[in-house]
Image: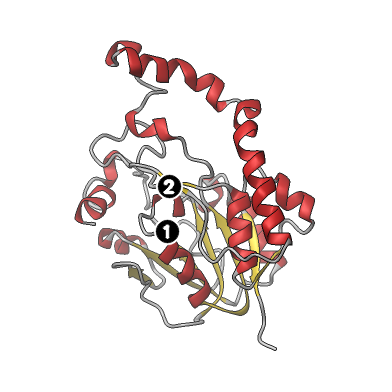
Amino acid sequence: MNKYKTFYDDRRHETYAHDYATMRAEHHSLCAELEEFISEHALADKRCLEIGSSGGFFQDLVNDYWGTDIAAGLATYYHKPYRVSEGSRYPFADEMFDAIWTITVYEHIPDVQSAMAEINRLLKPGGVIFFAPAWQCRSWAADGYAVRSYTDFDWQGRLIKASIPLRNSVLWRSLFIFPKRIARHALFLAGYRFRKLGYRKLKPNYDVYWESDADACNSMDPHDAILWFLSNGFECVSHVTHFSKFMVRNGPLVFRKARRV
């Protein structure tokens, strides 16, 4: 955990550094979709939490904004509440928030199962979440195979690098993804509930930041995320039909927590 925190706090200038003092929300690639989420669910005056809030780019999109991240040094960029996360439990009360959003964060969390449970704990019944990790992070990113020269590797490494275009192709990935989805979706329709998130562990690189997601701890399929949320008392608002759930490829997912009867 110490190495993890050091990587994101003390070495932020080497990894995900931005000019936090000047960067505007609209510069973010998902800002328009997040604004649509806020508008569609009437969140302007609701209490909202951003998990993995970084420099607080989105803190002025709603009035009652709260942010949390693991880096204490980020607090200087906030004029709204910011709390440093320590361990697997976020520093907020149960059912405190009407909405949560989290963008390109959950693929970097070592204890992702606990972090998923925290979403359920923190959201009020009827609350909504905008869930947007980087999906299906690649195992070769940690060693920078895509960006380093062939001369950096032995013959095995060169084979790995040469295989990346094929392994990145939609057809190749579909050969592995769709059989798993068919089996898991059939289990769900038969009544099985996925209390734990299905994902593949990755070995993050906290020594050299070769490229985006070289530090990813896990690789998630959005279909598995949908099954987890559905199995734990949420409705999928962004993908309503079973076909759309099964065919989901990328982008944010939106869920609503069930209301109490």
Q: Secondary structure at mark 2?
A: strand
Count of labels in the image: 2
Q: Amino acid at mark 1?
A: Val
Q: Amino acid at mark 2?
A: Asn
Q: Are marks 2 and 1 in contact (CB under 8 Å)?
A: yes
In the image, what residue occupies the spot 62% across and 66% down?
Answer: 193
Against 238, is 153 above or below? above
Mark 2, Cα crowd under 10 Å, few <14 / some 14-19 / many 20+, is many
**Mark found first going from the N terminus, 2 or 1:** 1
Q: Quadrant of residue 169?
A: top right
Instruction: Pick whichever, 39 or 116, lies toward us.
Output: 116
Q: Secondary structure at mark 1?
A: helix
Against 31, is 42 above or below? below
In the image, what residue occupies the spot 64% across and 31% down?
Answer: 175
User: Does 212 sit left or right of 171 as displayed?
Assistant: left
Mark 1, Cα crowd under 10 Å, few <14 / some 14-19 / many 20+, is some
Label of residue 231 in the image = none
Instruction: Please state, as top left, top right, bottom left or bottom right, where the C terminus lies in the image.
Output: bottom right
Coloration mode = secondary structure
Q: Quadrant of residue 229?
A: bottom right
- Residue 186 picture location, percent across and down: 71, 54
- Residue 2 picture location, percent across and down: 20, 56
In the image, what residue occupies the spot 37% across and 53% down?
Answer: 21
User: Does 121 sit left or right of 210 as displayed?
Assistant: right
Q: Which residue is mark 1?
A: 112
Against 135, is 256 above or below? below
Instruction: Please state, as top left, top right, bottom left or bottom right, where the N terminus lies in the image.
Output: bottom left
Q: Residue furthest bottom?
A: 261
Label of residue 218 in the image = 2
- Residue 115 picture location, percent across and down: 43, 64
Q: For the residues marked 2 and 1, what is the alpha-carbon distance in whole angstroms?
A: 8 Å
